[in-house]
Amino acid sequence: MLDFLAENNLCGQAILRIVSCGNAIIAELLRLSEFIPAVFRLKDRADQQKYGDIIFDFSYFKGPELWESKLEAKPELQDLDEEFRENNIEIVTRFYLAFQSVHKYIVDLNRYLDDLNEGVYIQQTLETVLLNEDGKQLLCEALYLYGVMLLVIDQKIEGEIRERMLVSYYRYSAARSSADSNMDDICKLLRSTGYCSQPGAKRPPNYPESYFQRVPINETFISMVIGRLRSDDIYNQVSAYPLPEHRSTALTNQAAMLYVILYFEPSILHTHQAKMREIVDKYFPDNWVISIYMGITVNLADAWEPYKAAKTALNNTLDLSNVREQASRYATVSERVHTQVQQFLKEGYLREEMVLDNIPRLLNCLRDCNVAIRWLMLHTADLACDPNNKRLRQIKDQILTDSRYNPKILFQLLLDTAQFEFILKEMFKQMLSEKQAKWEHYKKEGSERMTELADVFSGVKPLTRVEKNENLQAWFREISKQILSLNYDDSTAAGRKTVQLIQALEEVQEFHQLESNLQVCQFLADTRKFLHQMIRTINIKEEVLITMQIVGDLSFAWQLIDSFTSIMQESIRVNPSMVTKLRATFLKLASALDLPLLRINQANSPDLLSVSQYYSGELVSYVRKVLQIIPESMFTSLLKIIKLQTHDIIEVPTRLDKDKLRDYAQLGPRYEVAKLTHAISIFTEGILMMKTTLVGIIKVDPKQLLEDGIRKELVKRVAFALHRGLIFNPRAKPSELMPKLKELGAAMDGFHRSFEYIQDYVNIYGLKIWQEEVSRIINYNVEQECNNFLRTKIQDWQSMYQSTHIPIPKFTPVDESVTFIGRLCREILRITDPKMTCHIDQLNTWYDMKTHQEVTSSRLFSEIQTTLGTFGLNGLDRLLCFMIVKELQNFLSMFQKIILRDRTVQDTLKTLMNAVSPLKSIVANSNKIYFSAVAKTQKIWTTYLEAIMKVGQMQILRQQIANELNYSCRFDSKHLAAALENLNKALLADIEAHYQDPSLPYPKEDNTLLYEITAYLEAAGIHNPLNKIYITTKRLPYFPIVNFLFLIAQLPKLQYNKNLGMVCRKPADPVDWPPLVLGLLTLLKQFHSRYTEQFLALIGQFIRSTVEQCTSQKMPEMPADVVGALLFLEDYVRYTKLPRRVAEAHVPNFIFDEFRTVL
């Protein structure tokens, strides 16, 4: 009959594919459960208020139209709904596909069973498949995996969250309407069961059997599978565990399958007393905590509580006398085997001959160790014991007492067993690889010895003093031939023949009185030794390795091992060389990967890589977590070193008196520093002793692990220092900004110096790591802060700055800002608020309007540069860009609201437009015309002024940041600054040339050169924020004249001061000139240059008309408003770096030249 798993056996391949798919689905569910978006939990108040109206559970399906109409009634809800869709559709779709694959899995399994019954697979029926060894295993696994999937979903992705995700997918996805969509079936299968995975939560009635019956499955199939599992040893595991007391451990995988599958036929659990007794006697006579899949543990005492037959059957096992007996037995066994293992692990004990002679003894010891570890770990685990269940607590306390349980001793046993197993496996692998070569070598040696003996008895060789004996000569030659004729491939025959040859050699020594000649005796003894070695070598079988693999399975501890993390870390802290022993434990844990990957591999499924990547990744993360104690301990020592270096050790001067030498020597502190440094290098040595290891499919390099660990610890500490150091009290007078920056600067400098100090002792590139990680922290925080201004948010898993191995911690926001960079930015904006302060451009300083005290100056930015580096300033600049965009967008919507929708304002503007056109003319009776227009529109200017000044204030800050960046770039990296400036000029020249002659080259659409160089230029401060286009705009009617009116409405509030320029007249009505000018300039820059042209023409006309009126009325003084308007034009030309003729086009140049002399 055809092999069931052969590629051309359709029946076997179909069920193998289903099972392989099942393992992959479970891995995907476990992977996704770590990425549930927090909003779907609706845990905190803020989320409930914000998203409560757009995230629905299945109650939505009762009346979708009603809910949708509620949404449509509120535009802001629609907007939020759209934003939520954009941000979450990708992850929701991924979850939906996983849920869909669960449903598809059971549909495929049912279809396969129908095909079997209908005879689609020739000569195969359900009965024949169950008779085949592979078929039986696969059918049992197929049903079991479906059960595990359902349990995993309920445990990891709660019912409410599933419902909310499915409804969101239904509302947001276009795929739901397609004909082959089975949304209804998926919703029926995965609707909430009421189960809660929190410890102590009440179990819903009829759970999980009602959940398992949502999709009906062929009952005959279920009962036949249960029958097979009850009676057979389907994986032939008993052969690996010959001892009767290990029977339940041998059948442990089968027991887990049976536990899950019994829920598909709950009547057995409820009423079939005899069947349940049989099951318990076979599988659970001495254990009641089982691992069902990759370390998911279940306590039968709790799980079978609602089922009468199951509960009764289990009572014998849970009888306190039985519990006591088992606990005491395992306590004794573990003590006995631990002593044995420690004996085996002594240096030089496990030699090749010793191993080959004692294989059964060593394997028995391994079995005892692993069985004891399994029983003790599972039955003392906190995960498997509900703290609210009195009976379970009692049983657990009984075990802890009787087994004299000590987690440290159990962990030590696990370590030693893993080490012992690892050494044995490596020895066996090496012996297997060298088996044939060694055998041939021994054969050749033995044969040569016999030939030499034959020569000795020929009497030809002199000096041997052995008489010629032709019989013996012929006999030894024959023996030599016999040895050479031994065949490696036919091991049984060769083994028998070798034994006969050994006997023959012993007999020849006795019968022919050859003892008298020592040389001959020695030759015979050597040959016998070689023949013995041949027998030993031929007995090295791969079966031993397979048995060790089965016995050493640690998949049950996939989750439980976490409870030993603190013990592992403590032992590493005390003795860093422990890492080498831990390596064996991690490798033992990696053997758990064989369970889910076996079928995927057999089916040649493309899922192999992603599933092994997931489990290997989980394991490597755990390895990192354990070994993180090394960088943590290093940093603790580092902090002490920094403290000693900065506070205690005095710098030695270049010249000093010799009698002061002892004071400067400071032997105590220096000895302390040396001791701490030594401790740090010992830690490094500890982790580097762990060789490069393949964990699953991921290669773990200890040097990389150490570097990542150091990075992780650095990131954790620096991120915390930044978070804690930049929290401000907005009511503090004066502001806490500078002192806090200085304090933080000192802390960052401490980290930096310590890193520099340590790099040589740890053999890492300190400066490189420092720059990479600090820039990553700051960029990540800027990105998170800017998310507030983005519609499509960048999630953590999409961020290029966030990493799974070296995560940047997130802190709970303390105010409206999400991160420290937002708090810093808002504090700067608060203290330089144009309503409270006056910015003097020539001094780059802000003064308080009322007290005229200095508030802050450009020193602030050099302080930020010192504390947060270039990345910090650059990040602040990026954040200000986003804020300017937001302000400009708010301005546009305000313009629409207060000007374009107000009829009276529009009439005033129309009248004024008619009065001033054409713009080249002079307006008669100008004062009256202008100021009546200003008076009629007075009410709109307050909000207008606020918006303009906010933008102007941020632009001043951006200019200051660019200055600071450019200054430090020229200072610290003059070559970079020069190269960037030249490249920038060259590019601009090329682009200008292209516009004059389009045949010349220009960067193509897909060329990222311009985009990339902009990032460099901004980081080096080689840019002008005033020339930036922040938003795209449409045409706005009346825009130039509104801005002109706004400007002349503000001029009476300002006065000219010879030293300071334009300053505010009354602090009660605050206007600050530089933000006003820069705000207007930025705003005009966003629109077509035609608007700026008109705006400047209107100001020119205003100056000409007012001066004309003054002259005609013979007023000697130049009006203050004209001075203000002229100063505005002057500043406009200065800031935009345009030639002066732009202004002279609208104002006669003699007025420009002379107006300062008149003042």
Image (cartoon, helix red, strand yellow):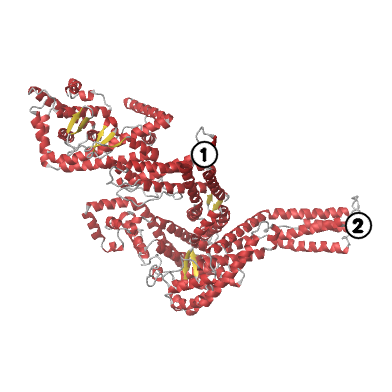
Between 1037 and 672, the one nearer to me in the picture? 672
Q: Residue at x 58, y 50 (%)?
A: 689
Q: Secondary structure at mark 2?
A: loop
Separation (CA) of disc 2 from disc 1: 92 Å
Between 911 and 487, the one nearer to me in the picture? 911
Q: Quadrant of residue 513?
A: bottom right
Q: Position of residue 368 (x, y in %)?
A: 60, 67
Between 1006 and 54, the one nearer to me in the picture? 54
Q: Residue at x 39, y 38 (%)?
A: 866
Q: Is residue 792 left or right of residue 485?
A: left
Q: Secondary structure at mark 1?
A: helix
Q: Is residue 701 visible?
A: no
Q: Nearer the viewer, mark 2 or mark 1?
A: 1
Instruction: Residue lying at the far top in this picture: please name it.
Output: 1150
Q: Is residue 719 left or right of residue 660?
A: left
| Number of disc labels | 2
Q: Which residue is mark 1?
A: 664
**In the image, is residue 834 above or below residue 164?**
above
Looking at the figure, which quarter contains the C terminus? top left
* Amino acid type, mark 1: Tyr
**Are dots 2 and 1 in contact, CB under 8 Å?**
no
Instruction: Residue lying at the far front in this picture: please name it.
Output: 659
Q: Which residue is mark 2?
A: 469
Q: Position of residue 205 (x, y in %)?
A: 37, 72
Q: Is residue 904 visible?
A: yes
Residue count near mark 2 (Cα–Cα under 10 Å), binned few <14, some 14–19, many ≥20: few
Q: Quadrant of residue 528?
A: bottom right
* Amino acid type, mark 2: Asn
Q: Earlier in the sequence, mark 2 or mark 1?
A: 2
Q: Quadrant of residue 515?
A: bottom right
Q: Position of residue 1152 (x, y in %)?
A: 19, 22
